[in-house]
Amino acid sequence: MSVPEPPPPDGVLTGPSDSQEAGEPAPGLSDASPDEGLIEDFPAEDRAVEHLVGGLLSHYLPDLQRSKRALQELTQNQVVLLDTLEQEISKFKECHSMLDINALFTEAKHYHAKLVNIRKEMLLLHEKTSKLKKRALKLQQKRQREELEREQQREKEFEREKQLTAKPAKRT
């Protein structure tokens, strides 16, 4: 009875690949014979094969099952870690946006203070212009009174000179 040849394990090349040029040896294979490395058919009894397979399974299966459980647990832990990482990233983005908002509020406070200062300056300038207008009005009124007084003074002087001037006497 012959045992079928097992498929090659992953990563092991059994022949030249399509990407290799003809005539180049495949890595890992010897140049001596193309048949070298192939498992030859040999007669064996079914019972012996079953015992060998059972022995191999009993020897490697518990370790493989433990490894499988460990890998499943690691995969599950990795999923949990990825979820946690995504949550932390979203928190970080939220904090970063809060910093941007805080910067905007700080800038708004700065401009508000500038507006308050401008308003104070405008009120102060308004008060000064009001005082200057009042003063200008008073000065104008004072100047008009002085001109009126001077005009009245000239008229009085003119009248006085008129009275002082000699008048010809009337002959009667």
Image (cartoon, rainbow, N blue to C red):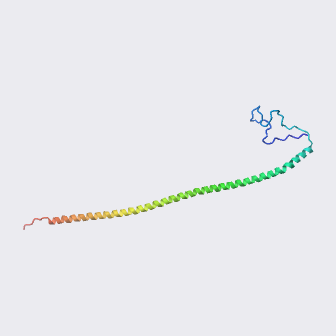
Q: Is residue 18 above or below residue 115?
A: above
Residue that extends furthest to the left in the rendered view of this protein: 172
Q: Would you identify the image quadrant in which residue 164 lies?
A: bottom left
Report the residue at 20% width, 66% height from top. 156
Query: Between 2 and 53, which is closer to the camera in this rendering?
Result: 53
Count of numbered badges drawn on the protein: 0
Question: In the drawing, does residue 101 fall left or right of residue 129?
Answer: right
Report the residue at 64% width, 55% height from top. 92
Q: Would you identify the image quadrant in which residue 8 lies?
A: top right
State the quadrant of the C terminus.
bottom left
Question: In the drawing, does residue 151 fall left or right of residue 45?
Answer: left
Query: Between 25 and 102, which is closer to the camera in this rendering?
Result: 25
Q: Where residue 22 sits in the image (x, y, percent)?
A: 76, 32
Question: In the drawing, does residue 6 fall left or right of residue 126?
Answer: right
Q: Would you identify the image quadrant in which residue 103 lies?
A: bottom right
Residue that extends furthest to the top in the rendered view of this protein: 23
Q: Is residue 55 above or below residue 35?
A: below
Q: Where residue 60 sits in the image (x, y, percent)?
A: 84, 48
State the quadrant of the N terminus.
top right
Q: Where residue 125 sits in the image (x, y, percent)?
A: 41, 61
Q: Is residue 99 above or below residue 14?
A: below
Question: In the drawing, does residue 144 fall left or right of residue 33?
Answer: left
Report the residue at 51% width, 58% height from top. 110
Report the residue at 84% width, 51% height from top. 62
Residue that extends furthest to the bottom in the rendered view of this protein: 172
Q: Where residue 5 sits in the image (x, y, percent)?
A: 85, 40
